[in-house]
Image: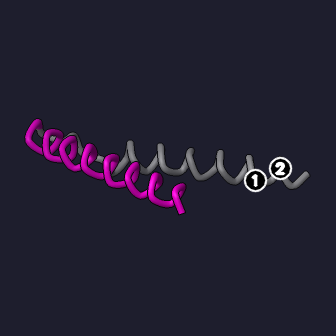
């Protein structure tokens, strides 16, 4: 029963994010997409390094 409640909460949260994103979201320019693309690669690299360090100790 607990699993069903958790799944329902996750579904409602995702549905809320989609509805709010469609209503209040604005399209990104090519410049913004490029900027976020660069930041994303850096964050992924940092998270991978942190996970490797955590696994070592």
Circle 2 packing at 10 Å, graded few (<14), some (14-19), many (20+), is few
Rendered-image quadrant of the C terminus: bottom right
| Front-lying residue, 4 or 38 | 38
Q: Does the magenta stretch include residue 50?
A: yes
Q: Is residue 44 left or right of residue 12?
A: left
Residue beneath the point at 47% across and 54% down: 51
Residue beneath the point at 83% across and 49% down: 3
Magenta stretch? Answer: 30-57
The reply to whether callout 1 and callout 2 are in contact (CB within 8 Å) is yes
Residue 34, position as x, y percentages in the image = 14, 39
Residue 32, position as x, y percentages in the image = 14, 45
Q: Which residue, as the protein is rendered here, is positioned at the far left? A: 31
Q: Is residue 8 left or right of residue 16?
A: right
- Residue 22 falls in image quadrant: top left
Residue 46, position as x, y percentages in the image = 33, 54
Question: In the image, which disc is placed on residue 3?
Answer: 2
**Label 1 belongs to which residue?**
6
Per the picture, the main secondary structure of the magenta-coloured stretch is helix
The answer to whether 28 is drawn above or below residue 2 in the figure is above
Circle 1 packing at 10 Å, graded few (<14), some (14-19), many (20+), is few
Q: Is residue 28 magenta?
A: no
| Front-lying residue, 37 or 57 | 57
Q: Is residue 36 left or right of residue 54?
A: left
| Front-lying residue, 24 or 53 | 53
Question: In the image, which disc is placed on residue 43?
Answer: none
Residue beneath the point at 65% across and 45% down: 11
Residue 2, position as x, y percentages in the image = 86, 55
Secondary structure at numbered mark 1: helix
């Amino acid at each position: 029963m607990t699993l069903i409640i958790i799944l329902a909460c996750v579904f409602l949260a995702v549905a809320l994010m989609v509805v709010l994103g469609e209503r209040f979201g604005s399209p990104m320019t090519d410049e913004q997409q490029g900027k976020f693309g660069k930041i994303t690669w850096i964050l992924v690299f940092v998270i991978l390094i942190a996970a490797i360090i955590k696994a070592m100790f």
